[in-house]
Amino acid sequence: MNILGIETSCDETSVAIVEDGVNIRANIIASQADLHARYGGVVPEVASRKHVERMIPTVLTALSTAGLGYRDLDAIAVANRPGLLGALLVGVSTAKSFAYLLKIPLTTVHHIEGHIYSSLLANPDLQTKFPVLILIVSGGHTQIVRMDGHGSYTILGKTRDDAAGEAFDKGARLLGLPYPGGPNISRLAESGNPSAVRFPRAVLGDNLDFSFSGVKTSLRTFVQRDAGSTPSQDVAASYQEAIVDSLVSRMRKAAKETGIRDICVVGGVAANRRLSHEMRTMASKNHLQITIPDPVLCTDNAAMIACAGYFRLQNNVPDNLDFDTYATETLGQAPRR
Ligand code: KG4
Ligand code: ZN
């Protein structure tokens, strides 16, 4: 079964074709990062217009990369929530048009559910391992989720303020680094000393929640006081270490408390090399099996949407063509009407 996946929730126009849920035949990602860099962040209207421009060419590139024609598509999966509304509308309108004309089923996918399914693309055996524990670290979300089966999620912990990706992006701005902040901090941090500056790790008591606003504020204060005397790579490495430490320690606690032995780290920040190294070290010390997708599957992509869509279609009827887009939606809940 070939599923065409479409992802346009933020600044990547992505189209993928995935066979039988987990075999990626094409995963085309047209990033707009360079375009938004001059504004220091994503400008929603600029993103929507670029999606309009790139949508159909990206579908055509995905089909030719997979060596398939329209008639070889069996279903369509599209991210319709949460995200920038104008951006989501482009992918959703395209998906509806193709589904209607080709007379094939269409399913909607929650963007974060898509990130969760990137772990199945990386390790299809996880389907036999439920329950699994998943840390989602993206630009807008930081959550620890227990997944008991397809479509069955319990949020065990979440950030009380900024998401981990937001902490990277805001930190990068304070350090004078361009958008996108996460990859730029991590590049600079590679040659830095992570113990040079001790940034605070939030202590939130006996739960699995996160907080990243304190570390960001302390970076701001540090940068003002230090006035450039500490090498910027040491500051970047130390700041990254504070974020990584909080994520690793909460995941260790979550695994211990739940007794779940299969863990995954997904979302854009999972592309961070220091985070994946520290998570793997923690997993091996605690005899946990860990899955972290390749960086291209951690950041936004349509293959994860097609994968999630495949399993939704196995377990649900397809959506009607009259569905909407939503800026904010909780994972695991049916969208409001
Ligand atoms: O999942 P994603 O691509 O988009 C959202 O759903 O938000 O995540 C984007 C976030 C951004 O905050 C970006 O700075 C961060 O992921 N990111 C990274 C790295 N690559 C992307 N953060 C740290 N290190 C990286 N290598
Ligand atoms: Zn994302």
Image: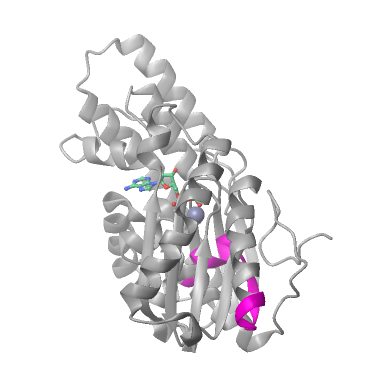
Residue at image position (54%, 74%) is: 308
Q: In the displayed image of the protein, which residue is found farthest to the front?
A: 101
Q: Where residue 187 sits in the image (x, y, percent)?
A: 23, 40
Q: Where residue 130 sits in the image (x, y, percent)?
A: 53, 82
285 versus 52 height, above or below:
below
The stretch drawn in magenta includes residue 108:
yes
Q: Where residue 34 sits in the image (x, y, percent)?
A: 35, 38
Query: Residue 207, can we see it?
Result: no
Identify the magenta region: 100-117
Left or right: where 174 falls relative to 316:
left
How many discs mark residues in the rendered view? 0
Q: Where residue 81 sits in the image (x, y, percent)?
A: 65, 57
Left or right: where 198 falls relative to 214:
left
In front of the other: 157 or 35: 35
157 versus 50 height, above or below:
below
101 versus 172 height, above or below:
below
Left or right: where 48 falls relative to 331:
left
Q: In which quarter of the image is the C terminus?
A: bottom right
Residue at image position (52%, 65%) is: 6
Residue at image position (76%, 62%) is: 335
Q: Quadrant of residue 215?
A: top left
71 versus 122 height, above or below:
below
Q: In the displayed image of the protein, which residue is found farthest to the left?
A: 191
